[in-house]
Image (tube, rainbow, N blue to C red):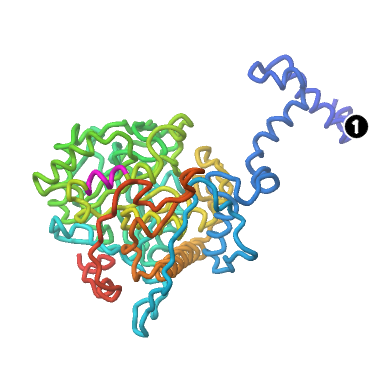
Amino acid sequence: MLSFLSSIAWWGWILIALVLVAIRDIFIQKAHTISHNFPIVGHLRYWLESIGPEMRQYFVANNREELPFNRIERSWIYASAKKENNYEGFGTDRDIYAHQHIFINNAMMPYKISENHPNAIDKTFLPCAKVMGAFHKRRKPYRPASIINVSAMSFGSLSAKAIESLNKGVKIAGAYHNTGEGGLSPYHSHGGDVIFHFGTGYFGVRAIDGGFSMEKLIKLVEINPFVKAIEIKLSQGAKPGKGGVLPGAKITAELAFIRGVEIGKDVLSPPNHKAFTNVPEMVDFIEKIAESTGLPVGIKAAIGKLEQWEELANIMVETGKGPDFITVDGGEGGTGAAPPSFADHVSLPWVYGFSDLYKLFQDKGLSERIVFIGSGKLGFPAKAAMAFAMGADCINVAREAMMSIGCIQAQVCHTNRCPSGVATQNKWLQNGIDPTLKSERLAQYFKTFRKELVEITHAAGYEHPCQFQMRDVEINVDDHNLSKELNRTYMYEKTPVPFTSMQNLKDCLYLGGKIS
């Protein structure tokens, strides 16, 4: 028998393997009709389908066609992160008459910076114009030193080396790093400012019964002074109003320790919080956390119905209590895995959701006391200028930050097979990430973003983006009146942000959480 097997040529073994595949396709497997009807060759269809996104990305789609980020947008981030030439030649190839195209109205005479101006010394200096926690007199107010920061992305969703790269990068850039709801990991502890974020699973501050533990939160803040604020997640753009399950097979000893859960046991993140069941209870919860930690406390949500938001605004007016900042997430979705029915249809896109919410709080006289953070494909200077004109005070970026450290938009974040090692726990794939190099790229992307936004701001005649007004930006709305100023499009005027000068922001005691 051994002699017979050894006499079979190499091509004979290939034929045997193909025959076995054909027998399996026809007589054994029942799941795939194509494989049954077209044995062997039917597998080619599934292989082509699996690499379809990459094929379209590189060979089929044009520069402005892809979603969520087209090739021009990705190329700008990659070039900016690598400090390469990110310019375009021969004019724009964008359809400037398309719906939602943004126009920024430039001044006849741009803003002129003096010799000793902070932006003459550092072209990338651009802090937030508001201080988190100032109105409510929190013990440890915080002025973000950068108007662009890393949005909520958890360790577990992202790899250890990706989180490490982001945290080291925000330290270099003077920005902050939102932990996401997966808890505070050692990879968040490389020197960058951190906003600790938790959701309904209370990972990292989780009690034995799966509820919230104030004692754990107080201890976390005490031993990690780089935590500058607390964010409570009500919902996210990817799947608002939906919980999730972290399979037990994914829970390693490290993840179990960080998240405060049991090894190998499925963990449920329900749609609702246990710590509060209504808006008044949520306000009380916010105040207890602020009092216990001394830190500014905010909330994050995707926007849909406004009735409960109006209830929150009324309570804030009556009591003087409430969140120090609100992060508005767009329904465009994000790094979180979600059913298409949620990602495509539940909650409003950022511009609609933010404008609805801002108007509501402005009508109650609350817009000056809240720091508004925008999150939803705003990681480009022109889009950020629009966001500031609408009332945003800071920008959080997730997918743009991922791209700056190597993400190629393979859109397989939910499969644990991310080819760039960013959104996977596969050790081999993670090894492609060099945190020392990638952190520099994240920092350079942030610096380039701030530099270009400052230049756009100066072109419009202002010193800081907070000075943008709705009338400074126009947007295409329909064929009859091709462009309208933002105030006529969304029917409100932004509340002026108190601002004296960049130098005043630079001299602020709370800039970057210096005082804690």
Q: Position of residue 295 (x, y in %)?
A: 19, 56
Q: Is residue 245 left or right of residue 359?
A: right
Task: Confirm whether residue 254 shows in the render.
Answer: no
User: As displayed, is residue 237 above or below residue 168?
Assistant: above
Residue found farthest to the top: 27
Q: Position of residue 455 (x, y in %)?
A: 44, 70
Q: Quadrant of the C terminus?
A: bottom left
Q: Is residue 412 left or right of residue 206?
A: right
Label 1: which secondary element: loop
The residue that disc 1 covers is: 7
Q: Quadrant of the N terminus?
A: top right
User: Which region is colored magenta?
Assistant: 356-362
Q: Is residue 149 left or right of residue 496?
A: right
Residue 197 located within the stretch drawn in magenta: no
Residue found farthest to the front: 480
Residue 34: quadrant of the picture: top right
User: As displayed, is residue 86 above or below residue 241?
Assistant: below
Q: Position of residue 60 (x, y in %)?
A: 69, 44
Q: Position of residue 241 (x, y in %)?
A: 34, 32
Image point (22%, 55%), residue name: 221
From the image, give the main secondary structure of the stretch colored magenta: helix
